[in-house]
Amino acid sequence: MAQFQEVLKQSALHPKPAGLVLQYGTSGFRTNAKQLDHIMFRMGLLATLRSKKTKATIGVMVTASHNPEEDNGVKLIDPMGEMVTQDWEEHATQLANADQEDLLTALKNIIEKEAINMSQEANVFVGKDTRSSSASLSQAVLDGVSALGGHSKDYGLVTTPQLHYMVCCQNTQGKYGEATVEGYYTKFCQAFIQLTKNTSNRTDDQKHLCLDGANGIGALKVREMESHLKKELQISLNNDGSKGRLNHQCGADYVKVQQKPPTGIKINPGERCCSFDGDADRIVYYYTDSEGTFHLLDGDKMATLISTFLKELLTQAGLDLKIAVVQTAYANGSSTHYLENTMKVLVRCTKTGVKHLHHVAQEFDVGVYFEANGHGTVLFSKAAEEKIQQLAEDTNVNDKRKKAALLLRNTINVINQTVGDAISDMLLIEAILAIKGMTIQQWDTIYTDLPNRQLKVKVADRRVIDTTDAERRAVTPAGLQEAIDNLVKKYRQARSFVRPSGTEDVVRVYAEADTQVRNLFSKLSLLLILMAVLLRLKNIWKG
Ligand code: G16
């Protein structure tokens, strides 16, 4: 077949380094950019096959998100804008790791297994972040698509969630919105303006937001979007990429893990601030108080604010819709306790990775999902959207119900339901705070986080750790979980777990407890737990 000859010819220009084996991680392949050219070419091939199989447009985003500048990676997007289905992650791994001479066999295996009609047309949307390696790597994706005769559209520099949105718009024939960057700004900013239009007595101070763009694509896109906001949100943009390095001492991951503001930004006491990550799919909020103490409002706090807002509106609208919040093991114990016991909403826990949270959220009428690191969104079932729409159009309902239905309708429109999106989440949070007339300090007091810390540990082979119970317990290496259990039971409200990262070559260690300071002599109970877990880990691996 001529197509296969072309694949052979083109793949020689994107050779796989001998012996290199890469695993499909939390959201795709991710490692040092120098090792990724063949992966990108092959993911272009795979996206073309996936498009033929689904008879729909597929997305390929070149980004390593929160990782350092020298890394890169690839995220595959399925027809409705969600992350690629897990069965195809296996195909991705097979294709990525096939030796150069076995590439055609690996490709043909997928075609046969999935019964793909090779004469079907294929369409692939491609986007990239601002990393210096992204230009040539996204060209490798485009080469892969054309080698198999697929059509591609190169969106160039876009945020990851923008590409998810484009794919969904394209496959819904524009029902979700127009598949252009302009269409994205129009849809989400119009909804924001509608939501905030009756909050007209807000001062400029209340409309002001300090944003850290992580020196990445999110900063460029916020600049482009600003005029659509018609001064209803006034953003002072820091780390816009003009001087600093991507994600270096800034960005959502740095702020969340270090629990401190980005380096070099001047923050006034009480000022509302937020940070995006490198591809603008995560966001965290924060402020410092008059004593200079840093306060973080992470994904858990966002999930709580959003679900409280939605639950109140559903009650006012008289709509009996089932709402749930989906979290991961990293969710602060206080947030789960508040959601379950005070708000009385259903809470579910899944493994790390928005693909897992997204699928669980789809089981409910309204599924709010957020990872503590600030990655999340809200999903509305088709039936829920229809009920809200009908009520918003009903001329026989009282004003209170109607107002709530209209607010719900605009809330749906400000949310990017395809994936967690820092820009859309920011607009949603800003709108909720404006409607409720709430300050960031008031939002922060909804519940108090248990003190917590997260560390990364470099080990010889992180795959020796296997976990269960949504990553809350380690199954291997033997003895590790018992060691953690023995340590944790010495402290009140303590919880700790370890898991291998799926985006970096590290093991992540998390711990929380009731307090960091027990008394003047016994230092930090929390850090004791962490240190002890770490030591235990090291001992196990030495043995
Ligand atoms: C990705 C995933 C997130 C996940 C994060 C960290 O985020 O999309 O769902 O929480 O990696 O994963 P891990 O702990 O396995 O390294 P991003 O923003 O880096 O694409």
Image: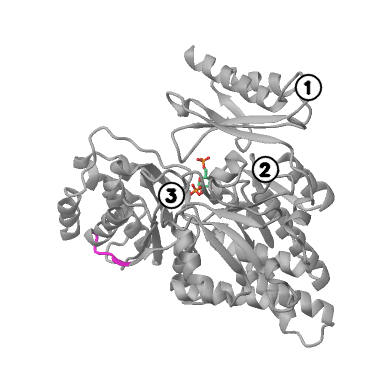
Secondary structure type for disc 3 = loop
* Residues packed near mark 2 inside 10 Å, few (<14), some (14 to 19) or many (20 plus): many
Pointer 2 residue: 331
- The circle drawn on residue 246 is 3
Real-space Cα separation, disc 1 to disc 3, in angstroms: 40 Å
Pointer 1 residue: 520
Label 2 or label 1, whichever lies nearer to me, is: 1
Label 3 or label 2, whichever lies nearer to me, is: 3
Q: Is residue 80 above or below residue 336?
A: below
Q: Nearer the viewer, residue 219 or 5?
A: 219
Q: Is residue 180 magenta?
A: no
Q: Report the side of 403 relative to 197 (left or right).
A: right
Q: Nearer the viewer, residue 445 or 348?
A: 445
**Residue 351 seen anywhere in this rendered image of the structure:** no
Q: Residue at x 64, y 40 (%)?
A: 330
Q: Report the side of 5 relative to 389 (left or right).
A: left
Real-space Cα separation, disc 2 to disc 1, in angstroms: 29 Å
Q: Which one is earlier in the sequence, the residue at label 2 or at label 1?
A: 2
Using the rendered view, name the quadrant where residue 469 is placed.
Answer: top right
Q: Which one is earlier in the sequence, the residue at label 3 or at label 2?
A: 3
